[in-house]
Image (cartoon, rainbow, N blue to C red):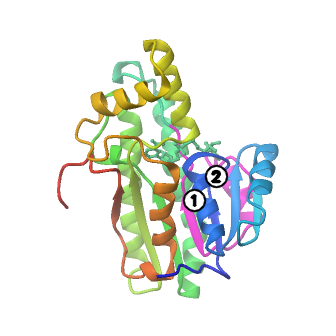
Amino acid sequence: MKIDLSGKTALVTGSTSGIGYAIAKGLAASGANVFINGRNQDTVDVSVRKLDGVGGKVCGIAADVSTAGGCKALVAALPEVDILINNAGIFEPKGFFDIPDEDWTRFFEVNVMSGVRLSRAYLRSMMTRNWGRIIFISSESALNIPTEMIHYGMTKTAQLAVARGLAQIACGTGVTVNSVLPGPTMSEGVETFVKDLARQNGQSVDEAAANFVKQHRPSSLLQRFASVEEIANMVVYVASKEASATDGAALRAEGGIVSTIA
Ligand code: NAD
């Protein structure tokens, strides 16, 4: 199977680094014209330059997708897409009793409402053109709610509900809507978190990463952090024409942490 996304336009939110950047790179390498997004114009420009020549044309739009205004500006700059990857997301370990209302709202705005607003803007025209892909980057934390960040888990489960509902709206069309569930993945955001752990515990970064998996994700079959490319590979496949029978699904790329078979 050769994935060819030539002629398709893709938007990846939060794609100046981490999993989003790897997805943008993978889509561009498969021929798609890709729009990078981040909050800062300079950072967006750097990522666009880095992806120059990888494959399809790469452009960038700076916008904060956690706000209605940011999504509106993004859609004004890019009124139609064939592939929407709702990747932008934040996480922060914090005990339940320490999470204030503002954090619950902020997590919901960034992790859920960004995808809701952009899907509302793009899904209808995808259905009219009878082809489209919407993919939410959720997490295994959607299924195994992490005790150390229940607010994060809540947003990741919410994404599954939204994605499934949108797939049902697009029933019978060439538009599919799915979620991809990564497990611990060595993105820039997570690397910072692991470096902090290593410093706190007087360990090397590799030791801290291995310890994290052993202690906090003991059921992992992979027994290590995934690379951002391992997640992007799944996303690029789901975005392809070849994945036309995969719809309304929560697709795990989490190294077997979730111990149920289906
Ligand atoms: P990251 O922090 O490395 O990168 C996130 C990107 O999103 C950054 O470029 C950041 O600037 C951007 N971003 C954040 N808020 C934004 C906003 N309001 N508007 C526009 N851009 C914004 O994160 P990551 O680890 O690559 O995570 C990407 C997605 O994958 C998230 O939704 C996360 O929940 C999910 N995920 C990550 C892991 C992991 O271990 N890394 C595991 C499961 C799920």
Residue 226 in sight? yes
Of 53 and 34, the residue lying toward us: 53
Instruction: Name the residue: 81% across, 51% down.
Output: 45
List the residue tagged with mark 1: 23
| SS for callout 2 | loop
Of 74 and 244, the residue lying toward us: 244
| Image: 160 above or below 29 | above
Q: Amino acid at mark 1?
A: Ile
- How many residues crowd around disc 1 within 10 Å: few (fewer than 14), some, or many (20 or more)? many
| Image: 10 above or below 258 | below
- How many residues crowd around disc 2 within 10 Å: few (fewer than 14), some, or many (20 or more)? many
Asked if the residue at label 1 sits under 8 Å from ligand 1, the reply is: no
Q: CA distance from mark 2 to mark 1?
A: 8 Å
| Image: 196 above or below 183 | above
Name of the residue lying farthest toward the left: 260
Q: Are marks 2 and 1 in contact (CB under 8 Å)?
A: yes
Mark 2 vs 1, N-terminal side: 2
Q: Quadrant of ligand 1?
A: top right
Residue 15 numbered mark, or none: 2
Asked if the residue at label 2 sits under 8 Å from ligand 1, the reply is: yes
Estimate the x, y position of residue 155 in percent, counting from the top left. Answer: 41, 45
* Image quadrant in which you'd find residue 74: bottom right
Q: Amino acid at mark 2?
A: Ser
Q: What stretch of residues is rendered in magenta?
A: 61-90
